[in-house]
C-alpha cells in the first residue's frame, strides 16, 4: 500500500480501482492472459501508478487469493463459533454453505478466481481440516454411506466449487437453495454409518 496517502485520497481510489479491474480481468481471462497493461488500461491509470501499489502481477494475484481464502476461513470460523452450542453439524453446515454461497454471489469475480485457481494447500489441507473438525463429533448425521470422512469431505468441497461455478454464478439458483440442496444430498435424515 502506498505510504503517506490520506484515506479516500485519489491514491486510495486508484489502488481500489486497480484491484477491482484486476479481479474482473483475472476472472474473465485468467492469470496468464491478463497483463499489467490490461489492468492499467481498464483502470485508466498509468503503469507507474500500478507499481506504486503492487510489486508485480503475481504479488497482486497472490494477495487476491489470500483475501479470498481469509474470507472463507472467517465465514466458517464465525459460523462455527456462533452455532457450536447446537452440536448439530447438519444445521451448522447449512448455515456455513449458505454464507459461503452468499459471499460467492456477492463477489462473483473473486469467487471465480479463488475457485478456479484455488491454492492447493487451502483446498487439500485447510478447508478439509475445518470441515472435519465440524463433522467429527456428529458423524452419524451424514448420509447412509460407508465412506471415509476424507472422501466425503473432498466430495463436498468439489460440489461446492463446481456448483458455484456452474449454477450459482450463472444465477440458476440462490445461496440458500443451493445450501439446502447440498445438505439434503450429504446429510441423512436418520442415523448413518461413516468410517473415520
Image (cartoon, rainbow, N blue to C red):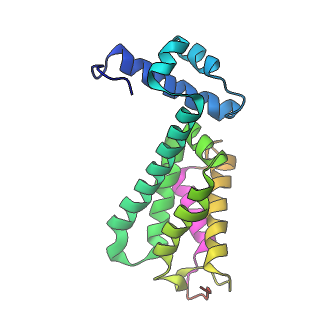
Quarter of the image where the N terminus is located: top left
Q: Residue at 45% of width from left, 70% of height from top?
A: 91
- Figure quadrant of the C terminus: bottom right
What x and y, as percent, mark residue 131?
Answer: 51, 69
Work out which residue is located at the far front of the displayed protein and give it.
Answer: 55
Please give the name of the residue rendered at 53% of the width and 16% of the height, measured from the top-left corner: 43
- How many marks overall? 0
Residue 129 in the image, given as x and y percentages of width and height: 52, 69
Q: Which residues are magenta?
A: 174-189
Asked if 43 appears above or below 175 in the picture, the reply is above
Is 184 covered by the magenta stretch? Answer: yes
**Which residue corresponds to the image point at 46% horizontal and 54% vertical from the top-left?**
99
The answer to which of 118 and 161 lies nearer the viewer is: 118
**Where residue 46 appears, x then y in whole percent?**
53, 10
Residue name at image x 55 percent, y 60 percent:
179
Most foreground residue, 45 or 93: 45
Q: Is residue 39 above or below residue 23?
A: above
Query: Looking at the image, which is closer to me, 16 or 98?
Result: 16
From the top left corner, tell me how far across and down residue 161 is, in percent. 64, 54
| Helix, strand or loop for the magenta stretch, by majority | helix
Is residue 118 left or right of 101 when viewed as pictured?
A: right
Q: Is residue 29 above or below residue 47?
A: below
Q: Is residue 152 magenta?
A: no
**Frontmost residue, 25 versus 49:** 49
Amino acid at each position: 500500500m502506498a505510504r503517506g496517502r490520506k484515506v479516500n485520497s485519489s491514491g486510495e481510489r486508484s489502488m481500489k480501482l486497480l484491484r477491482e479491474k484486476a479481479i474482473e480481468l483475472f476472472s474473465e481471462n485468467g492469470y496468464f492472459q491478463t497483463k499489467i497493461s490490461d489492468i492499467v488500461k481498464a483502470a485508466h491509470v498509468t503503469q507507474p501508478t500500478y507499481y506504486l501499489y503492487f510489486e508485480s502481477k503475481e504479488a497482486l494475484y497472490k494477495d487476491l487469493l489470500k483475501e479470498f481464502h481469509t474470507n472463507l476461513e472467517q465465514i466458517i470460523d464465525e459460523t462455527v463459533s456462533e452455532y457450536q452450542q447446537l452440536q448439530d453439524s447438519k444445521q451448522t453446515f447449512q448455515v456455513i454453505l449458505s454464507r459461503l454461497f452468499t459471499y460467492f454471489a456477492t463477489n462473483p469475480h473473486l469467487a471465480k478466481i479463488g475457485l478456479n485457481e484455488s491454492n492447493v494447500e487451502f483446498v487439500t489441507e485447510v478447508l478439509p481440516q475445518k470441515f472435519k473438525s465440524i463433522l467429527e463429533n456428529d458423524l452419524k448425521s451424514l448420509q447412509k454411506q460407508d465412506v471415509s470422512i476424507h472422501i466425503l469431505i473432498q466430495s463436498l468441497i468439489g460440489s461446492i466449487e463446481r456448483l458455484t461455478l456452474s449454477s450459482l454464478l450463472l444465477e440458476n439458483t440462490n445461496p440458500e437453495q443451493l445450501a439446502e440442496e447440498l445438505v439434503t444430498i450429504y446429510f441423512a435424515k436418520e442415523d448413518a454409518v461413516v468410517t473415520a
